Image (cartoon, rainbow, N blue to C red):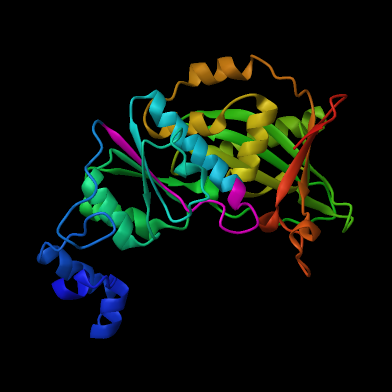
């Protein structure tokens, strides 16, 4: 195995050659203390552990069209917040185009494959206090916990792909922050008719939604009850496809976090990070929510400039949004 490692073969390649599982190869490496240095299994370690308490951010950036750009925005905002709490930010990405690559966000960068083996090697060296990993990458979190048991792994649920809801009736989205005990209201979004299909979709939204008093009271009470039943704290959205009847509860997605951050004038990602690292103050959130914003009403419209990218036969959906426009009353619009 030592020779195979010096040739640059990965766990997967060795496993395929030996007809065993990659996990068995990883276990054999651990038993024989064959740990990689930065990017290699050679004799020199090119990376020293960063001084001070560390937070590891794992993300692949805007590799494809769609909400990956919004995901990268969330990753960038996550990277900013630990710095305010005296953590050194260490980023692991396989995409040089990610915002995480910039020196203003990361104190140290590993440009490595997004594999369990590579992520675990970084975690073994850096021993971060916190490790933030994207939703759907739970195996990366487990690999970090195996080599650095003291690391607290935090899943970034915001990086999931938004659902494509198409309805003939108005759809509502109640947004809230749950700290494990209290649900803080962030307002209700009302979806608008998509001009292309003539139905309500998640591609055009209004904040705040225009609700009758009785319906607003019912939606608020139902949503707070539904969110308070979630197992973990976080930013949540309750979907309604009929008046006052909730259909689904899910983590707030990256595009909606970006939109709500703009219209509320609050950095929701920073607030979420504080909640995850035990620095959250509900009192500060309430104060921020009353400071007001220049957006007394806003409309979000997704953009799909496929022609600019010479793309054909592309379908418009939340997962393929390339950009977005926010319109506000008497103030024009912002990209």
Is residue 66 in the magenta section? yes
Q: Where is residue 176 in the image (x, y as percent from the top left)?
A: 59, 34
- Does residue 140 lie above or below 19 as drawn? above
Identify which residue is drawn at 73% across, 58% down: 317
Residue 268 pos. (x, y %): 56, 31
Depth check: give the residue in front, 124 or 223.
Answer: 124
* Span highlighted in magenta in the image: 53-69
Q: Position of residue 81 (x, y in %)?
A: 44, 30
Where residue 217 sits in the image (x, y, percent)? 72, 30
Is 117 on the left or on the right of 254, as rendered?
left
What residue is at 80 percent from the left and 55 percent from the top?
A: 167
Residue furthest to the left in view is 32
Q: Which residue is drawn at 30% across and 82% down?
A: 16
Q: From what the image shows, is residue 7 above or below residue 173?
A: below
Q: Between residues 119 and 229, which one lies in front from this camera angle?
A: 119
Image quadrant holding the C terminus, namely top right
* Quadrant of the drawing holding the N terminus: bottom left
Residue that appears at 27% across and 78% down:
15
Residue 267 is left or right of residue 231, and the answer is: right
Residue 255 visible? The answer is yes
Residue 138's place in the image compared with 55, above or below, is below
Instruction: Confirm whether the magenta stretch covers residue 297.
Output: no
Q: Is residue 311 above or below residue 250?
A: below
Q: Is residue 178 visible?
A: no
Q: Name the residue nearer the viewer: 22 or 227.
A: 22
The answer to whether residue 41 is left or right of residue 248 is left
């Amino acid at each position: 195995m030592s020779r195979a490692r010096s040739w640059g073969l990965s766990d997967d390649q060795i496993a395929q050659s030996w007809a065993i599982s990659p996990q068995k190869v990883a276990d054999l490496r651990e038993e024989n203390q064959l740990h990689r240095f930065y990017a290699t299994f050679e004799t020199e370690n090119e990376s020293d552990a960063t001084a001070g308490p560390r937070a590891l951010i794992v993300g692949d950036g805007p590799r494809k069209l769609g909400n990956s750009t919004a995901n990268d925005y969330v990753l960038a905002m996550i990277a900013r917040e630990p710095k305010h709490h005296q953590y050194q930010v260490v980023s692991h990405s396989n995409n040089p185009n990610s915002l995480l690559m910039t020196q203003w966000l990361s104190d140290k960068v590993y440009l490595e494959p997004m594999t369990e083996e590579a992520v675990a090697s970084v975690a073994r060296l850096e021993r971060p206090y916190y490790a933030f990993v994207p939703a759907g990458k739970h195996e990366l979190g487990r690999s970090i916990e195996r080599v650095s048991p003291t690391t607290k792994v935090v899943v970034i649920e915001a990086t999931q792909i938004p659902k494509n809801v198409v309805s003939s009736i108005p759809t509502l989205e109640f947004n809230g922050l749950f700290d494990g005990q209290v649900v803080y209201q962030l307002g209700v979004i009302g979806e608008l008719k998509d001009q292309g299909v003539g139905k309500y979709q998640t591609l055009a939204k209004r904040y705040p939604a225009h609700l009758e008093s009785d319906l607003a009271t019912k939606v608020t009470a139902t949503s707070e009850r539904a969110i308070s039943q979630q197992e973990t704290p976080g930013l949540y959205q309750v979907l309604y496809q009929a008046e006052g009847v909730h259909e689904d509860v899910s983590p707030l997605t990256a595009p909606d976090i970006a939109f709500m951050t703009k219209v509320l004038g609050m950095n929701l990602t920073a607030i979420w990070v504080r909640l995850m690292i035990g620095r959250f103050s509900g009192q500060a959130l309430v104060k921020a929510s009353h400071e007001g914003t220049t957006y007394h009403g806003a409309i979000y419209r997704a953009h799909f400039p496929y022609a600019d990218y010479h793309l054909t036969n592309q379908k418009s959906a939340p997962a393929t949004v390339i950009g977005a426009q926010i319109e506000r009353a008497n103030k024009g619009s912002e990209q």
